[in-house]
Amino acid sequence: MNSNRKARVIAFYLPQFHPIPENDLWWGKGFTEWTNVTKGRPLFRGHKQPHVPADLGYYDLLDSQVRLKQAELAREAGVDGFCYWHYWFGNGRQLLEKPLQEVIRLGQPDFPFCLGWANHNWEKKLWNSEISPLSRQLLMKQLYPGVEDIDRHFYAMLPAFKDPRYMRIDNRLIFLIYTPHENPYIRQHLERWQELAQKEGLGGFYFIAQCRRKDELNEYRKLPFDALNYDCLFYFFNQGNFRKLLAHFLHWPIKTPYKAILKKYDTSLIKDDVYPTIYPNWDTTPRRGYVGTIFAHNTPELFEQHVRQIIDATQPNVDGDKVIFLKSWNEWAEGNYLEPDKQFGHQYIQALHRALYDE
């Protein structure tokens, strides 16, 4: 890590900005995440919707020039690398894999990356604000076929693991898992991948479990994970099912003032094995309408305060680095993105840079 930098920031990266046949079938021809973004509408006074991209426009991630520009912007912000969300549904089935495959094939952009396995079902309630949140239509089921599939998964991703840009901690490959408890073979998975990494001369994995509840921190410490990523959005919006139902029927979004992050973020949970998450913003109403959840009244200045607070609370890891995850680089339909938009331009990028370099 640059000696002048206060923390190492890894930004979650959504590859949902290009058409795929499955989305064409489920949502209509040409669907990408931009389809949801453009549906955003202001739902109360002061609610800023829709969010309109600035420098990069409504891009297609299969355009290599877009990916190069994203890397340039990330460097400007002080981001160390992207954590690409990776979708492996079992039995060799992947979705949204093409952008990463192109990054590996072309060797560009020359920007570090790692993988986060988003091991969850795809359901219609997650993607369409016009569908009642009480309904669920399964689109793609996350399967765990067993040991043979564990090996198949590893070798499918081996070109990425062997790429010199792949990020490491303690000289081991970073691999994050979104919902470890959903995988009935999680211990076997972690142990087998360590064996395969040694066999392939990769030096091993540095496994990170993502946690959304405090009790998961101790639960995942019982498994062979090296670290934990704490995503406390669940805490900020845990209003209970009754509140969510009321929000839906009264057209009343669940709002939390952005300043609440500064007051409610439990920094005592940040240990040397717990990597915290920082949030530029949050607003799921483009996807979920009135039942969405929102950080209200966010500004670049408040984001900078938030980042500084988390940097101060973060403890060095085994490499002596402070590691922080950014949620996210480009989750536009959830409102958590650092890419420039028409409202703030580069102000969020500049805010992160100032906090990281203590300017």
Image (spheres, rainbow, N blue to C red):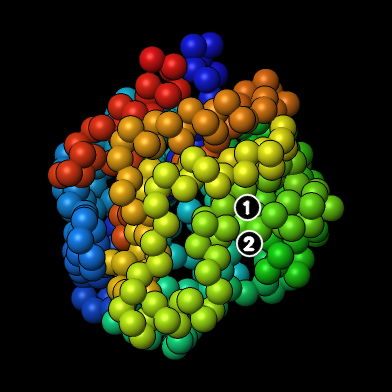
Rendering coords of residue 340 (x, y %): 23, 40
Instruction: Give the residue drawn at x 33%, y 74%.
Output: 252
Rendering coords of residue 41 (x, y %): 19, 66
Q: Nearer the viewer, residue 282 or 87?
A: 282
Q: Badges 2 and 1: C-beta atoms under 8 Å apart?
A: yes
- Local secondary structure at mark 2: loop
Question: Which quarter of the rendering shows the N terminus?
Answer: top right
Instruction: Give the residue drawn at x 62%, y 52%.
Output: 210
The residue carrying pointer 1 sits among few (fewer than 14), some (14 to 19) or many (20 or more) residues within 10 Å by Cα, namely many
Position of 234 compared to 128: left or right? right
User: Amino acid under label 2?
Assistant: Thr
- Local secondary structure at mark 1: strand
Instruction: Give the CA separation, mark 2 to mark 1.
Output: 7 Å
Please tell me how many numbered marks the rendered image carries. Answer: 2
User: Amino acid under label 1?
Assistant: Gln
> Is residue 270 something one can see in this rendering?
yes
Q: What label does residue 179 carry, if any?
A: 2
Residue 316 vs 271, above or below: the answer is above
Question: Which quarter of the rendering shows the C terminus?
Answer: top left
Instruction: Give the residue drawn at x 57%, y 52%.
Output: 232
Q: What label does residue 210 carry, if any?
A: 1
Instruction: Give the residue drawn at x 19%, y 37%.
Output: 345
Position of 244 compared to 148: left or right? left
Position of 317 compared to 38: left or right? right
Q: Earlier in the sequence, mark 2 or mark 1?
A: 2
Residue 68 vs 257, above or below: the answer is above
Q: Which quadrant holds residue 198?
A: top right
Rendering coords of residue 18 (x, y %): 28, 59
Position of 217 compared to 338: left or right? right
